[in-house]
Amino acid sequence: MQVEILGTEDGQLRVMARGAEPTLMNAIRRTIMSEVAVPAIDKVYVAENTGVLYDEIIAHRLGLVPLKGGENLKLPEECECGGKGCPNCEAVLSLDVEATSDKHVVLSGKLKAEGTVFPANSQIPIVELNTGQRLALEAHARLGRGKDHAKWHPASVAVVKYEPVVEIDMEKCDLCALCVEECPKRILEVRNKALVVNEITKCSLCKVCESICPRGAVKVSYNTSNSMLTVETAGSLSNDELITAACDIIIKKANELKKLIGELAEAQ
Ligand SMILES: [Zn+2]
């Protein structure tokens, strides 16, 4: 298997694996989505809320704010407290804002870290307050996994696709450029009296070019022995940290399986 880092664009990291079963890349994708643990707000204690939004809506919004840090935290189910919540498995954030003008938007940056966990982005709106309205609360963040709740999904994008193949028959092509205009990814171009494909990996395999061509000069297919993983973090970890964390989890699980099979073979 050959692995090539295709680069980062618009916050998305793209990795191509050549000569590997797509299931391998899909295992990394699935592990990112469901197994990589990141912190998120799980409990909110509201001291005062005189704004127009219910406590529950605010708690829900706070839960979806991506958080960074928490490397020292244990997963609640692995903590000595048995998951009840203690300083080893929870980090506290506090928020206290009283609006002095109307339409005051309380942003995630107002969440003050009292532990090791803090908002990954300070510009996420939580609630809009008018003059004199106050929101004061304490939030407890804990580590969790995407398979438990969407707020612990560490990636907003994690997809695998086959390597696209676009074949152009220049004997049939009359350079009408209909496909160039219709391609949603803008990867086709007429250059030096020929139809060429730029950045083939951006092709989404939508086949619009193939269906719009009146002369059947364009054919879109894919190579099943090469697959491409695209990852865009939600903010808690970087894209490369997500991929390495997923690989570590897969390796750990494979080692556990190997050990169990070894024990079984010894017992027989
Ligand atoms: Zn604990």
Image: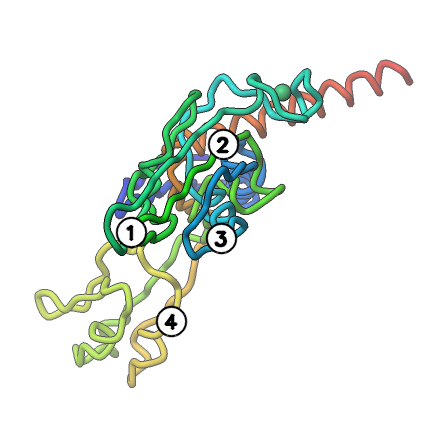
Q: CA distance from mark 3 to mark 2?
A: 36 Å
Between discs 4 and 1, the one toward the N terminus: 1
Q: Which residue is mark 3?
A: 224
Q: Secondary structure at mark 4?
A: loop
| Image position of 176 with respect to 248: above or below | below
Between discs 1 and 2, the one toward the N terminus: 2
Could you tell me the amino acid type at mark 1? Thr
Q: Secondary structure at mark 2?
A: strand
The residue lying at 39 percent from left, 29 percent from top is: 118
- Is residue 5 visible in the rendered image? The answer is no
Please tell me in which quadrant of the rendered image residue 250 appears: top right
Between discs 3 and 4, the one toward the N terminus: 4
Could you tell me the amino acid type at mark 4? Lys
Q: Which residue is mark 4?
A: 207
Q: Which residue is mark 1?
A: 131
Question: Seen from this angle, which residue lies furthest left?
Answer: 192
Q: Which residue is mark 2?
A: 39
In this orientation, which residue lies closer to the viewer: 69 or 164? 69
Could you tell me the amino acid type at mark 3? Thr
